[in-house]
Amino acid sequence: DAKTTQPTSMDCAEGRAANLPCNHSTISGNEYVYWYRQIHSQGPQYIIHGLKNNETNEMASLIITEDRKSSTLILPHATLRDTAVYYCIVRVRYNFNKFYFGSGTKLNVKP
Amino acid sequence: DAGVIQSPRHEVTEMGQEVTLRCKPISGHNSLFWYRQTMMRGLELLIYFNNNVPIDDSGMPEDRFSAKMPNASFSTLKIQPSEPRDSAVYFCASSSEPATEAFFGQGTRLTVV
């Protein structure tokens, strides 16, 4: 599976949009982009995934560039409860034996 | 739905002892995963089951680790004998096909002294 590169940490003011970038320049055509987050001491939580079109759900939006080499997770109105480590993962759908987590981005939402 | 249930939540044991971690996946899910998380190595996939059959155990660190899934509603991860370097948080996750996201349990924090 393609590897991902994410910033180690980011800060965001409460109520503002949080934009978390992810580079996946070696992504292949059948690999999806997934985002998970892990709030301190809890298990990772699924957020959203996409192939090439932008996606939106109740938690976040996912913007994937046209060449699919990078993506951005957007939390439209960050709250203190969104403070967590956010993981960007690329993998072939249904291929759970290669569902690898990188080091992620620690998002600090500040009042 | 109660989600993925892991037990115990915390385990402290002495080096050399056998440790058994337990997981109940979400009902109806046919895939189950065991992960280990440490500060140094992050989240590592240990083993993956599909329809109760181990598919890939290449992440299992050594022979001291073993995992079983006797039925669709229960799995165990056993460490025998345990060592201090096994101290970590162990997560169990499950998923169903064709859905692609995995749902994680709250984890078991293992401390081997």
Image: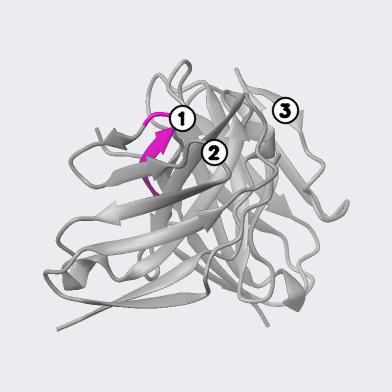
Above or below A75: residue A106: below
Q: Label 3 to label 2, Cα distance in Å?
A: 33 Å
At horizontal 38% and vertical 30% (from top left) the residue drawn is B26
Furthest-right residue in view?
B63
Q: Which residue is mark 1?
A: A52
- Disc number placed over residue B54 in the picture, else none: 3
Front residue of this view, candidates A97 and A70: A70
Pointer 2 and pointer 1 on the same chain: yes
The stretch of residues the image draws in magenta is: A45-53
Q: Are marks 2 and 1 in contact (CB under 8 Å)?
A: yes
Name the kind of residue labelled 1 in the image.
Lys
Tag 2: Cα neighbours inside 10 Å, few (<14), some, or many (≥20)?
Answer: many
Give SS at disc 1.
Answer: loop
Give SS at disc 3.
Answer: strand
Give SS at disc 2.
Answer: loop
**Residue B97 spot, x, y in % from top left:** 48, 17
Frontmost of labels 3 and 2 is: 2
Q: Which residue is mark 2?
A: A68
**Residue A14 spot, x, y in % from top left:** 15, 75
Pointer 1 and pointer 3 on the same chain: no
Rendering quarter of residue B64: bottom right
Front residue of this view, candidates A32 and B32: A32
At horizontal 78% and vertical 38% (from top left) the residue drawn is B57
At horizontal 54% and vertical 64% (from top left) the residue drawn is A6
**Principal SS element in the magenta part?**
strand
Front residue of this view, candidates A102 and B34: A102
> Mark 1, chain letter?
A
Q: Can residue B8 be seen in the rendering of this structure?
A: no
Name the kind of residue labelled 2 in the image.
Arg
> Mark 3, chain letter?
B
